[in-house]
Image (cartoon, helix red, strand yellow):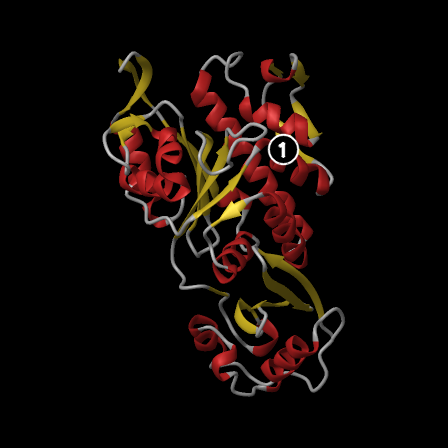
Amino acid sequence: MTGAPAELSALVTRLYAGSDLGGSASRSAAAALKTRTAGPATVAATASVGSWMGTPVAVVTAADDVTLAVGPTWRVVGGWWPSLGVSQPSLGAGGPRWVLAIGSDARKGQPLERTRADVLQVVGVDGRGGGGVMGLARDLWVPLSTGGKGKINAAMVFGGPQAQVATVKAVTGLPLEGYVVLGFSGFKKIVDDQGGLPIVIPKTVVASHAKNLVIKAGPQTLSGAEALAYARERKTLPDGDFGRSRHQGEVILAAAVKAKLAGPAAIPSALTSFSEVGRSNLSAEQILTFTAGLHTLSPLQVGRGVAKGSFGTAAGQSIVVLGAESRALFASFRDGNLP
């Protein structure tokens, strides 16, 4: 097997030989592999190795088979193995899963995890090939997990990303697994390192944050700076912060489509790039199975939505008060899918 450390190579050999993996597989992966048939004596496989927050991760591909593994004592944590007669992918505990994607408003010299959240997007998968991306406008006036009421994006200032997750959980009723958080410079670096972001822009946007940069309607490949400008623009949009949140969902979905086209083998490199500039409380097993799950999605089965409400004022601030439409959106997302 090319590209694999010796211990990982030995583990994959045991997997295809039909051997008992014992403690070298997660509970869910072991259950999925229990009914597998033995594969060929020799398997032409390729390993892609990277890291997530200091923990080694790997994706091993062999024809249509994909094995997800976590080190440093290598364990199989998921994958799909049609050549071994395993009918369904093993991607963690199964069922719906949700992760909160946070964009930090931190400027140079400010802590990434203790400034206001500039982006709040809940990314969900239903475990059946569908999913959704739901945006939360920054001005939503809600109870904060740190106490009192405030704009939803203030939770990170008072209690960090964990407090932001707790606040969003309470507001939406969705059992978020955890968070990923990026700053402006980190976002731009990732987009540029991956060769730009292919996306279809519905309407031409003049980005006031970027010296009135014009992002034209139609198919585009945005640079990191252009993608950031598109995701942050609010002032020139007719629906303001709601439109801004919608754009952010478009960017996330475009990134997911690009990742799907790159194939599962590209996951370790992407996770390594994120780890260099971002933060997360998700374990290597959680993020590896979640991102691999994105590769099983059909883009046509991934819906988008933005939690909206009525405008008002509180504590001298312009705010948005959640209404019945947003509560219906939250309820609709409880199966991990949006229409």
Q: Quick one: label 1, few (<14), some, or many (20+) residues within 10 Å? A: some
| Residue 64 visible at all | no
Residue shown at the point (56%, 88%) measured from the top left: 19
Position of 204 relative to 296 (above/below): above
| Quarter-of-image position of residue 225 | top right
The quadrant of the image that shows the N terminus is: bottom right
Q: Could you say where residue 157 lies in the image, as x and y percent from the top left?
A: 39, 32
Q: From this viewpoint, which residue is outermost toward the right?
A: 2
Which residue does the numbered mark 1 point to in the structure image?
Answer: 185
Amino acid type assigned to the residue bearing label 1 in the image? Ser
| Residue 43 visible at all | yes
| Quarter-of-image position of residue 156 | top left
SS category of the residue bearing label 1? helix
Q: Could you say where residue 270 lies in the image, as x and y percent from the top left?
A: 64, 50
Q: Could you say where residue 116 lies in the image, as x and y percent from the top left?
A: 43, 29
Residue 72 or 214: which is nearer the viewer?
72
Position of 315 relative to 155 (above/below): above
Position of 164 relative to 313 (above/below): below
Q: From this viewpoint, which residue is outermost toward the front?
A: 109
Q: Is residue 95 left or right of residue 250?
A: left
Residue shown at the point (54%, 55%) measured from the top left: 296
Q: Is residue 269 left or right of residue 242?
A: right
Q: Could you say where residue 334 lies in the image, as x and y percent from the top left?
A: 32, 46
The quadrant of the image that shows the C terminus is: top left
| Quarter-of-image position of residue 267 | bottom right
Residue 8 or 16: which is nearer the viewer?
8
Residue shown at the point (37%, 29%) measured from the top left: 154
Residue shown at the point (53%, 27%) measured from the top left: 247
Number of numbered labels in the structure image: 1
